[in-house]
Amino acid sequence: MAKVYFTSMRCELGDSLLDKLRRLMEGAGFRTIDFKKKFAAIKIHFGEPGNLAFLRPNFAKVVAGQVVLLKGVPFLTDCGTLYVGRRTHALSHLDAAYENGFTPYAAGCQILIADGLKGTDEVDVPVKGGELVTHAKIGRAIMDADVVISLNHFKGHELTGFGGAIKNLGMGSGSRAGKMIMHNDSKPVVDKKLCIGCKVCAKNCAQGAITFEAKKAVINHDLCVGCGRCLGSCNQHAISNSWSSAPDALSKKMAEYAKAVVDGRPNFHINVVNQVSPFCDCHQENDAAIVPDIGIFASFDPVALDRASIDAVNNALALHGTIVDERKMRKGEHFTSIHPITDWRVQLDHAEKIGLGENSYELTTVK
């Protein structure tokens, strides 16, 4: 079984969560990686401004600091997005990162947008064992790195069920063209009985694919890239995927992209399971956390890491007044209750099938 290491959010007087993160990394074997004079990409999500659930820069500074101690050269990185927001090109993406506290001074290292100014600086990477993707389009700076570290905020997601290491590595490392490839099986449709014509969905569509007829939204599938922003922004639940297999295909492609990123070089992964919001940090807002803060997990195996994290979330009681509590599921399949069209097992099972990692794990607690 893969080894996953865990530390809780509890801290005794005189100790800190950042100290515990350092001990967790050491206990999980981080120092066995050869960093000397190596570039280390720390793949992170900087958070869309307005959202307050993203990871604090303090976590990134600890990770970068450990790389520096081991004579490595770290940098924080992410790629551009498809949807309307502040991270569609490198300049606004950097502004957003700085606004959320991810400056080179706060993070202890430089920050690079991996796919360049307009999201076109990419590397065509073969996917070993890929079933839906033979070549992945990955941001060049990520592929130029010698070591890959994923530092992930664990949360829900409207198309993949949850987002952890696999999503941060796969979807997050794809260039804009790569993200379109991953999303293009997913085409949402509108239930006109539920649509109230508020036009919030259209404001969130970067492709101009949504128009209105008789005050009801209509989605042009020739323009739609299936990014899912309209699903997350519709408060009336009037938008859904047109067939149930679409989220599954996205999850599988995402796993294959993640494998393309880590194959052939050292990689290490950290999931911070706190402020577990029901939706992705890509949103300009975040709903209340669905469970209490759980802790931090670390592993060389991204699949086992995500499995341990979701097991911990599903085993936790939902907090009162949250979206899970409103749907009367206090314990169990939390992300499925939030996003019924998704099956979170798909990305894990497919990732295991193609050799990215394994679902079974042995959990060791680090004090």
Image (cartoon, rainbow, N blue to C red):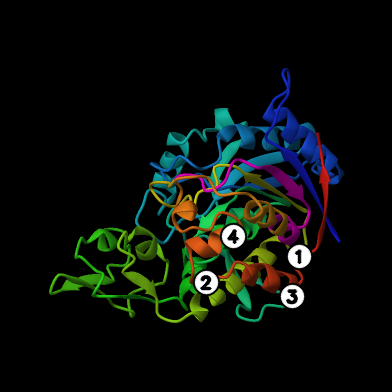
Instruction: Report the quarter where the N terminus lies.
Output: bottom right
Residue 105 visible, this angle? yes
Sequence order check, earlier mark of 4 and 2: 4
Query: Are there few (<14), some (14-19), or many (20+) residues within 10 Å of tag 4?
Result: many
Q: Secondary structure at mark 4?
A: helix
What's under tag 4, amino acid-wise? Lys
Q: Quadrant of the C terminus?
A: top right
Give the CA distance from mark 3 to mark 2: 18 Å
Residue ID for mark 4 = 167
In the picture shown, does residue 65 fall above or below 35? above
Looking at the picture, tell me which residue is in the foreground, 335 or 280.
Answer: 335
Does the stretch in magenta take in 77? no
State which region is magenta.
288-306
Q: Amino acid at mark 3?
A: Lys
- Looking at the rendered structure, which numbered label has been put on residue 359? 1
- Left or right: 223, with 139 as reference point: left
Which numbered dot is residue 182?
2
Q: CA distance from mark 4 to mark 2?
A: 11 Å
State which mark lies toward you, 4 or 2: 4
